[in-house]
Each structure stands twice: as structure tokens, then as C-alpha cells.
Amino acid sequence: MDASRFISSGLIEAYVSGLATSNEIEELKRGMAQYPEVRAAVDDCQLDMEHYVTLQAKTPAPELKQNILRIIADEETARENGTYVEQTEVAFPNEEKVYVSSAWRWIAAAVFVALLGSLYMNYVYSGKINDYKGRYEALLSSQNSLASESNLYRTRLEQMEASVNIVKSPSIKAVKMPGTKPFPTALATVYWNQQSKEVFVMVNNLPEPAADKQYQLWAIVDGKPVDMGVFETGNKDELLHKMKSIDNAEMFAITLEKKGGSLVPTLDQMYVAGKAS
């Protein structure tokens, strides 16, 4: 048995409370000799028990000590005189006289020891219950976290499936928009449903804009730019960005504008453009 098994098996608690068998005691002693952490766990357990018993202790009335000492002295005198009787009168303050036999004193002592053991075991198992409760709450939290992640992945999958269905629709026209001369590596694609007039844009390769900037899609109609809306690029799980609808367009382009968009495109910030015909 390794050190962790000794510590978690409950053998230490049984040993300290006097409930361990002789075989268990021998086994634990070997573990204490082999593993310093087991020895430390036994010492800690003993200190915990002593602390708990101290907390539960109640100070007896001062008269009780004098009564007990008197009883002992009387018994010794009676034994010496040969007049000892197996029964002693014990007087408690403000109480009626009670006769207690020696046999019952031993029984009371045994009950007292058992009570201390019971109190200690309650303390030990209460700690274990709290430990198990903590583990259960941790497992429950982990399960809730996994459920949240599962829901997140399910949502992402549904979004991807919806995007794929849009792209595969026979009514969709794909408009490739390669990078302009200042931004040759940029690339984006417009998916235009010419029946429903819906427009979606996919970012293939656009650099992340500054916090105060946004990309804006434009449609060129009769040679004039028409605002199709702005979109964010931070969410990599969002494959398609739905833009404003349009009946017809000669071409599409994307510019980088101030956050919220502009009324007219900033031509020197045009990243991509492509003909719709």
C-alpha cells in the first residue's frame, strides 16, 4: 500500500480512535516507518482529536473533585479496617444522594470512553462528508461546464451547417473579390442569392482591423457605390456575415472605414473588389 492509500483508507482514523485491529495497527506502523507523510498524517490526526476533545470538554463543578477524593479516602480507610462494602455514597451539590457501586464506575468509564470515540468519529466522518460534498460540487461544476461547451459546439455546428446550405444553394452566385494592388494578399467572397436578393460575405483573408475601425461592404450599381453594411471579423466561427439585400449589382468591394461605417467608401482603403457579372 502506498502513502496515499494509507492516508485515504480511514486506517489512520481507526488507529487514533482505538478501533483498529492488531493487524491494521502493525500495517500502519510499517507504513509510518516507510513513509514520512503517513507519520505526519497520524500526528495531525492525533492533534485534531485532542483539539476536538478539548473543544467538547466541560469543566466539572469544584465540589465534584472533593467528593471523589473523599470517596477514595473512605474506601481506603474501610479496606484497612476490613469494613469495606461494595457500595459508596456520593453526594452531589443540591442533589439527592446517589449510591454508585464500583462495577458501575467501570461501566461509566467505558461509556465515557465510547462517547469520546463516538464524538471523534462523528468529527472524522463529518470531515469526510464535507470532503465528498466538495468533490461532488466540483464534479457537478465540471459537468455543467462540459454541458455548456457541448451546447457551444452544437451551436457552432448548426451555424456551419446553415452556412454550407446557403453556399450550396443553386440560387447562390459566388463573387470572388481578390485583393487590390495595395493589399494583394487580401481575399473575400460574396454569396448573392439572386432570387431572395440576400447577400452574405465570407472573409477568406483580411487583417484584423483596429478597435475603432470596421470593414464595410459596397455594391456598385450603375457606377455608384451602395452601402451594404459593416461586419466584424473577430468571430472566426461565423463563416458568413449577412449583409443588406440588393436587387442587382455590377460589382462588390470592401473598404476599411471608421467604426459604424461611412456614407461613401474610402478608396485608398479598398482591400478587395470583384465583378458580379
Image (cartoon, helix red, strand yellow):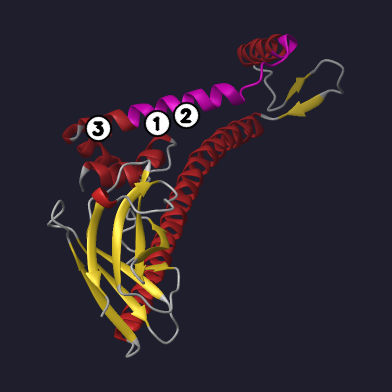
Q: Which residue is mark 3?
A: 37
One can see residue 168 in this view: yes
1 and 2 marks in contact (CB < 8 Å): yes
SS assignment at label 1: helix
Residue range corresponding to the magenta coloring: 42-64
In depth, the one of 76 and 179 nearer the eye is: 179
Q: Position of residue 36 (x, y in %)?
A: 21, 30
Viewer-nearest of labels 2 and 3?
A: 3
Q: Is residue 240 above or below residue 264?
A: below
Q: Which residue is mark 2?
A: 49
SS assignment at label 3: helix
Q: Name the residue type under label 3.
A: Glu
In depth, the one of 178 and 81 nearer the eye is: 178
One can see residue 240 in this view: no
Q: Name the residue type under label 1.
A: Cys
Q: Position of residue 216 (x, y in %)?
A: 36, 57
Classed neighbour count for the residue bearing mark 3: other residues with Cα under 10 Å, few (<14), some (14–19), many (≥20): some
Q: Position of residue 89 (x, y in %)?
A: 77, 21
- Which residue is located at x 43 percent, y 42 percent? 19
Q: CA distance from mark 2 to mark 3?
A: 18 Å
Q: Which mark is residue 45?
A: 1
Kindly indicate the quadrant of the structure image that contains residue 95. top right
The number of callouts visible is: 3
